[in-house]
Image (cartoon, rainbow, N blue to C red):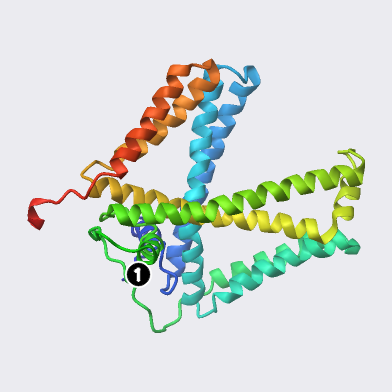
């Protein structure tokens, strides 16, 4: 795909090539996205700042709950950016002719500091190693583009859904078109992708639950239920606890890799069924506000409406492909 270095095209490229881990992205493409995410974070922060007074006045009021929901929706956008951000970073490394494996190496180096700190070698190491990793990453991301052979991205915009695909093909399409809001996805493409997501999420969630409970119970036993004795707790749990925490963060990060592909495959499934994909967004936003109102008033009918919206979405997602006149 031709490089687009302006702000708008860079945003479009960021999403459409979310599944492109073999191509390259120029320095302007990367830093335009950095600016966009900074502005988004700034807007979310302002919204959060506005929401705080409402919470301080009355945390159970309707206005407070609505502001909380708006703030949550704003910050939840970042959960959808993990997958395309990872691929963009890898493409930027490759564009600078630096092996993307160095990115993994930098993450590991940043992780070494906390491990050394919990083994009594000084808490300053927990800051030093991440700082070194951050500086190394920044230097690489600032390197200019270097001429090289570019692997073309296989996905094309406005791709029609493929009926009757298998599990492996659907999962591959799920990730390759992970940021593609154009085109369509068939029932088999959608539901195989959902099955894959469930297979990933349920076991890892159970692992997280078990690990968190183990840390809490073990920590309480070691520190004698003294929640203020943080140093003693961390030192007693040692390296194992830090590794578990790292694994938990890795699991959450892995979940974020599914967020945007799940959204886009649902978007394309709505289009494939002949329903405007904006209804998918509307259903979820309305459900979020219904949840807010229900939390504020404890209204059973509101819960039933939210359940009805979920059922409507499932029905739409189960509809067959709607063939158009140009396919007849």
Does 283 sit left or right of 43 as displayed? left
Check the picture and name the quadrant holding the N terminus. bottom left
Q: Work out whether 292 lies above or below 324.
A: above
- What is the quadrant of the C terminus in the image? bottom left
Where, by quadrant of the figure, is residue 68 drawn? top right
Residue 35 visible (yes or no): no
Residue 194 makes an appearance in the image: yes
In front: 203, or 24? Answer: 203
Q: Is residue 64 left or right of residue 17?
A: right
Tally the marks: 1
Task: Judge from the rendering whether residue 202 lies leftward or rightward of residue 9; answer left or right.
Answer: right
Using a 10 Å C-alpha cutoff, classify the residue at mark 1 as few (fewer than 14 neighbours), some (14 to 19) or many (20 or more): few
Tell me where residue 239 appears, x and y as whole percent.
82, 61
Whole-percent x, y for residue 241 in the image: 79, 56
Between 89 and 34, the one nearer to me in the picture: 89
The front one of 80 and 25 is 80
The image shows residue 173, relative to residue 181, as above or below, that is: below
Give the residue displayed 42% in from the left and 23% down from the top: 304
Q: Where is residue 4 in the image (x, y as percent from the top left)?
A: 34, 65
At numbered mark 1, what does the secondary structure look like: helix, strand or loop?
loop
Residue at 49% over, 60% down: 85
Q: Which residue is drawn at 85% across and 54% down?
A: 237
Rendering coords of residue 221 (x, y %): 89, 44
Residue that appears at 52% across and 50% down:
38
In this figure, which residue is indicated by the disc labeled 1? Answer: 3
Occupied quadrant, residue 224: top right
């Amino acid at each position: 795909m031709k490089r687009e270095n302006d702000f708008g095209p860079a945003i479009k490229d960021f999403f459409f090539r979310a599944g492109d881990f073999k191509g390259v992205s120029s320095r302007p493409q990367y830093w335009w996205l950095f600016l966009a995410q900074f502005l988004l974070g700034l807007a979310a922060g302002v919204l959060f700042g506005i929401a705080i007074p409402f919470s301080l006045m009355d945390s159970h009021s309707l206005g407070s709950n609505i502001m909380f929901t708006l703030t949550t929706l704003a910050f939840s956008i970042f959960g959808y950016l993990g997958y395309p951000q990872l691929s963009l970073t890898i493409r930027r490394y490759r564009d600078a002719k630096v092996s993307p494996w160095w990115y993994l190496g930098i993450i590991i180096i940043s992780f070494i500091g906390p491990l050394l700190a919990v083994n009594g070698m000084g808490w300053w190491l927990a800051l030093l190693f991440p700082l070194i990793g951050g500086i190394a990453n920044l230097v690489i991301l600032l390197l200019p583009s270097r001429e090289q052979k570019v692997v073309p991205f296989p996905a094309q915009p406005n791709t029609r859904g493929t009926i009757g695909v298998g599990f492996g093909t659907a999962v591959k399409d799920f990730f390759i078109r992970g940021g593609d809001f154009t085109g369509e996805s068939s029932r088999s493409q959608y539901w195989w992708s959902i099955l894959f997501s469930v297979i990933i999420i349920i076991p890892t969630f159970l692992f997280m639950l078990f690990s968190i409970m183990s840390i809490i119970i073990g920590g309480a036993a070691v520190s004698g239920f003294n929640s203020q004795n943080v140093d003693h707790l961390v030192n007693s749990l040692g390296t194992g606890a830090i590794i578990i925490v790292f694994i938990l963060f890795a699991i959450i990060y892995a979940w974020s890799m599914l967020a945007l592909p799940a959204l886009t495959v649902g978007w394309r499934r709505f289009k494939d069924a002949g329903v405007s994909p904006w209804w998918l967004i509307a259903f979820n936003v309305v459900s979020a506000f219904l949840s807010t109102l229900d939390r504020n008033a404890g209204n059973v009918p509101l819960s039933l409406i939210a359940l009805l919206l979920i059922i409507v979405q499932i029905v739409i997602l189960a509809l067959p492909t709607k063939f158009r006149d140009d396919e007849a």
